[in-house]
């Protein structure tokens, strides 16, 4: 863009959309070059809120009218999941840049269509709100993996059960905890960040087996998941998540022939083998011998304190997206086309749990949609009783 600022419009100013309005209005010194000029919501009470709290920002009821207004350069999409690809495609066709919140969509077929549309508009910037990619610990993990120091990947295990959500959380909105409203539970709502990072760091698995169930909540969708996956190089992975464990855990462990990375409690510990495990095993003659190691510890807080240059989380994504559009950086953190990768893993987990079978990736997209529609129908029939 040959402009000095990027004018943003937000579609959907519920809880998350309102959060972003506050970044633009109260933390604008962290996202220089970004200005909120318009918002849109179908609910009268949300539009009233915007009119009373966002001076100078134009308020719309119809997002297509906002797109045609000439007031925005980029669109942030903060609606229920099913509408993300639909609105993104409409925005691109209107000549607007898109920054879509997670997940990219509910199922890969609709996201694939969104990605195909993005290819038709190479002059537009398509991004995903994968704010966890700004976390310096995950950045360091990716650097270690790509440097070769970890060697060949052998296992990745993520236990992410600290997404605790009480009954009151699901009671706050009619679309929450439903197949028709969200299209999924913990996998679609809370875990797109971890599913993105899981595949960002280890790659996309080639097969998945899983169980997904509902525990202790009056909802239709899953809030407890255990998935086992295989990778093309023979490595294995386990992904465990829930919204009912109290207390919960957030521990990522990545093992390779060159050592092990553990991320937990705000730090990354890299235990590096002095030589690759297969090499050591081949020449070692000591009964029960094991490779010598060196340990390195990295903490994220030093990076986070440099707020102006490296703001964290959602602010960091908005800043990077804006800077890239204004040609202030040549590194783009979260390309929108990559949103399908973590969603593919998510869809495979769902399909494996629904069918009780191992699911290969690429998965059967039509089979996934059929199973999803069956659950929506069951949900609707249950509501009528």
Image: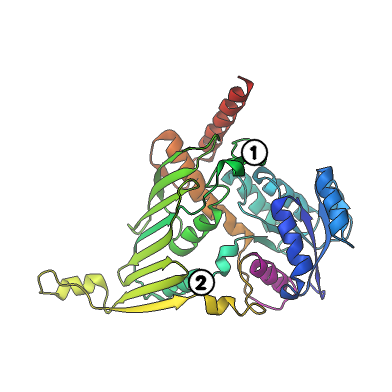
Residue found farthest to the top: 385
Residue 67 visible in the shown view: no
Q: Is residue 6 left or right of residue 269?
A: right
**Residue 338: % across, % down:** 58, 58
Q: Which residue is mark 2?
A: 139
Residue in the foreground of this view, choosing between 17 and 233: 17
Residue 312: x and y, percent? 61, 70
Near-viewer residue (162 or 227): 162
Q: Earlier in the sequence, mark 1 or mark 2?
A: 2
Q: Which mark is residue 376?
A: none
Residue 253 against residue 295 in the figure, above or below? above
Instruction: Give the image quarter of residue 4.
Output: bottom right
Q: Residues within 10 Å of mark 1 (few under 14, many from 20)?
A: some
The residue closer to the viewer here, 262 or 345, is: 262
Which type of secondary structure does the marked residue at label 1 adopt? loop
Q: Does residue 17 appear to the left or right of 267 in the view shown?
A: right
Q: CA distance from mark 1 to mark 2?
A: 33 Å
Q: Circle 1 sits on which residue?
A: 181
Please give left or right for residue 26 compared with residue 170 in the image.
right
Task: Report the residue at 37% width, 79% height from top.
Answer: 296
Q: Identify which residue is drawn at 62% across, 54% down.
A: 102
Q: Is residue 366 above or below residue 361?
A: above
Residue 231: x %, y % from top left: 38, 55
Image quarter where the N terminus lies is bottom right
Q: Can you see residue 222? A: yes
Structure colour scheme: rainbow
Which of 17/166 is in front?
166
Residue 68: image x %, image y %? 87, 53
Give me the residue at 69% from left, 72% from top.
324
Instruction: Find numbered disc 2 in the image and state the secondary structure of the residue it sits on.
Output: helix
Q: How crowded is the residue under tag 2: few (<14 C-alpha within 10 Å), some, or many (20+)?
A: some
The magenta stretch is 314-330
């Amino acid at each position: 863009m040959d402009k000095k600022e990027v004018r943003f419009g937000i579609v959907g100013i519920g809880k998350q959309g309102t959060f972003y309005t506050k970044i633009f209005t109260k933390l604008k010194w962290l996202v220089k070059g970004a200005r909120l000029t318009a918002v849109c919501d179908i609910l009268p009470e949300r539009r009233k809120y915007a009119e009373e709290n966002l001076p100078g920002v134009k308020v719309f009821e119809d997002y297509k009218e906002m797109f045609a207004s000439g007031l925005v350069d980029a669109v942030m999409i903060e609606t229920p999941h099913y509408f993300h690809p639909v609105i993104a495609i409409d925005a691109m066709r209107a000549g607007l840049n898109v920054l879509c919140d997670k997940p990219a969509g509910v199922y890969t077929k609709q996201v694939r269509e969104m990605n195909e549309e993005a290819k038709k508009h190479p002059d537009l910037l398509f991004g995903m709100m994968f704010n966890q990619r700004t976390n310096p610990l995950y950045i360091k993990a990716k650097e270690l993996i790509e440097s070769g120091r970890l060697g060949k990947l052998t296992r990745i295990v993520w236990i992410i059960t600290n997404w605790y959500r009480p009954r009151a959380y699901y009671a706050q909105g009619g679309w929450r905890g439903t197949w028709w409203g969200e299209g999924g539970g913990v996998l679609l709502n809370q875990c797109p960040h971890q599913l993105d990072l899981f595949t960002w760091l280890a790659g996309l698995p080639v097969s998945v087996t899983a169980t997904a169930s509902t525990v202790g909540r009056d909802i239709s969708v899953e809030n407890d998941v255990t998935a086992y996956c295989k990778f093309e190089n023979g490595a294995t992975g386990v992904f465990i998540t829930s919204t009912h464990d109290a207390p919960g855990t957030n521990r990522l462990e990545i093992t390779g022939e060159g050592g092990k990375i553990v991320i937990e409690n705000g730090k990354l510990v890299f235990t590096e083998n002095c030589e690759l495990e297969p090499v050591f095993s081949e020449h070692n003659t000591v009964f029960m011998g094991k490779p010598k190691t060196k340990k390195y510890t990295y903490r994220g807080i030093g990076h986070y304190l440099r707020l102006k240059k490296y703001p964290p989380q959602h602010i960091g994504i908005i800043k990077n997206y804006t800077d890239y559009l204004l040609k202030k950086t040549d590194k783009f953190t979260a390309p929108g086309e990559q949103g399908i990768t973590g969603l593919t893993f998510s869809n495979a987990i769902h399909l494996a749990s629904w069918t009780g079978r191992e699911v290969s990736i690429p998965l059967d997209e039509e089979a996934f949609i059929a199973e999803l529609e069956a659950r929506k129908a069951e949900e609707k029939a249950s509501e009528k009783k």
